[in-house]
Image (tube, grey):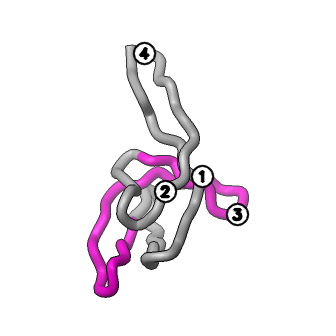
Amino acid sequence: MNTVYTLLEVTAATVRRGDLIEIGSKQFKVRNLVDVPGGGRRVYFGSGEAFVFRRGTRLFAMRALRKW
């Protein structure tokens, strides 16, 4: 099965489960999301690590568009 990915900018409001986010030189797959006060989101990665998106945080992510 092949997957097509697209590169896009994500924020606390637009990040989704399954997104691949690169921080530093490592890629992390978003496993879970939890809202935090002030409009942010705590993002849990498949590796067990976490990252907090504040309202103004913007990062690039790869998102799967379609599988066939």
Q: Residues within 10 Å of mark 1 (few under 14, many from 20)?
A: some
Report how far apart the C-alphas of labels 1 and 3 lie in the structure: 8 Å
Earlier residue among tags 4 and 2: 4
Earlier residue among tags 1 and 2: 2
Report how far apart the C-alphas of labels 3 and 4 lie in the structure: 29 Å
- In the picture of the structure, the residue carrying the numbered disc 3 is 24
Of the pair 47 and 17, the residue shown nearer to us: 17
- Compared to residue 26, the image places residue 6 above or below, namely above
Element under label 1? strand
Earlier residue among tags 3 and 2: 2
Mark in the foreground, 4 or 2: 2
Mark seen at residue 10: 2
Where are the magenta residues, as a range? 19-43
The picture quadrant where one finds residue 22 is bottom right
| 35 inside magenta stretch | yes
Mark seen at residue 67: none
- In the picture of the structure, the residue carrying the numbered disc 1 is 27
- Compared to residue 49, the image places residue 20 above or below, namely above
Residue 68 position, x and y percent, is 38, 13
Report how far apart the C-alphas of labels 4 and 1 lie in the structure: 21 Å
Amino acid type at image mark 3: Gly
Q: In what quadrant of the picture does the N terminus appear?
A: top left
Amino acid type at image mark 1: Gln
Element under label 2? strand
